Image: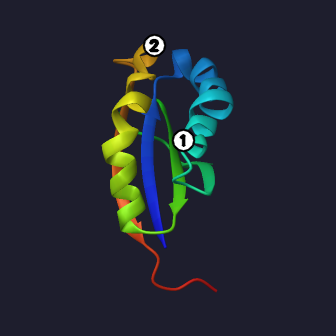
Amino acid sequence: MYIYNVTINIDEDIHDDWLRWMKTRHIPAMLDTGKFHKALMTRVRGEEEMGGITYSVQYRTDSKATLEKYYAEDAQTLSEQSKPFEGKFVAFRTELEIVSEQ
């Protein structure tokens, strides 16, 4: 099992529009690829030196191969959909392999 984690710091001036877009458009579109079976969006607590509000979105997938298929088939198109927020956020992505879950 793998988790594709995207951590995003979003400017406060567009936060509400971005959050609505994430919840109603982007996350559903990620799940609609069929490559992820669950998404968990969390807000990172604490003050950010650079300002803004930080979130982590974790998308669960069954394998590294499925994640690679997402990169090849869907990542660019879904990334381009964030253009209305361009220059107003910073994002970084990590891949996590689940070792144990209890």
Q: Residue at x 59, y 31 (%)?
A: 22
Q: Residue at x 40, y 20 (%)?
A: 88
Q: Is 47 left or right of 24, judged from the image as shown? A: left
Q: Is 47 left or right of 17, judged from the image as shown? A: left
Q: Is 63 left or right of 28, judged from the image as shown? A: left
Residue 39, percent from left and from top: 61, 52
Q: Earlier in the sequence, mark 2 or mark 1?
A: 1
**Toward which corner of the image does residue 90 lie, by quadrant?**
top left
Is residue 51 in sight in this rendering?
Answer: no
For the residue pair 57 and 10, the one nearer the viewer reads as 57
Question: What's the distance in space between the residues labelled 2 and 1, CA to CA?
Answer: 18 Å
Is residue 75 in sight in this rendering?
Answer: yes
For the residue pair 28 and 85, the one nearer the viewer reads as 28
Find disc 1 in the rendering and name its residue: 30
Callout 2: few (<14), some (14-19), or many (20+) C-alpha neighbours within 10 Å?
few
Residue 19, percent from left and from top: 62, 28
For badge 2, the amino acid type reads Pro
Q: Residue at x 44, y 23 (%)?
A: 82
Work out which quarter of the rendered image holds the C terminus and state it: bottom right
Callout 1: few (<14), some (14-19), or many (20+) C-alpha neighbours within 10 Å?
some
Q: Please, what secondary structure does the residue beneath circle 2 have?
A: helix
Is mark 2 in CB contact (under 8 Å) with mark 1? Answer: no
Residue 41, percent from left and from top: 61, 48
In this rendering, the label closer to the viewer, 2 or 1? 1
Find disc 2 in the rendering and name its residue: 84
For badge 1, the amino acid type reads Met
Q: Please, what secondary structure does the residue beneath circle 1 have?
A: helix
Residue 93, percent from left and from top: 35, 49
Q: Is residue 24 above or below residue 5?
A: above
For the residue pair 101 and 61, the one nearer the viewer reads as 61
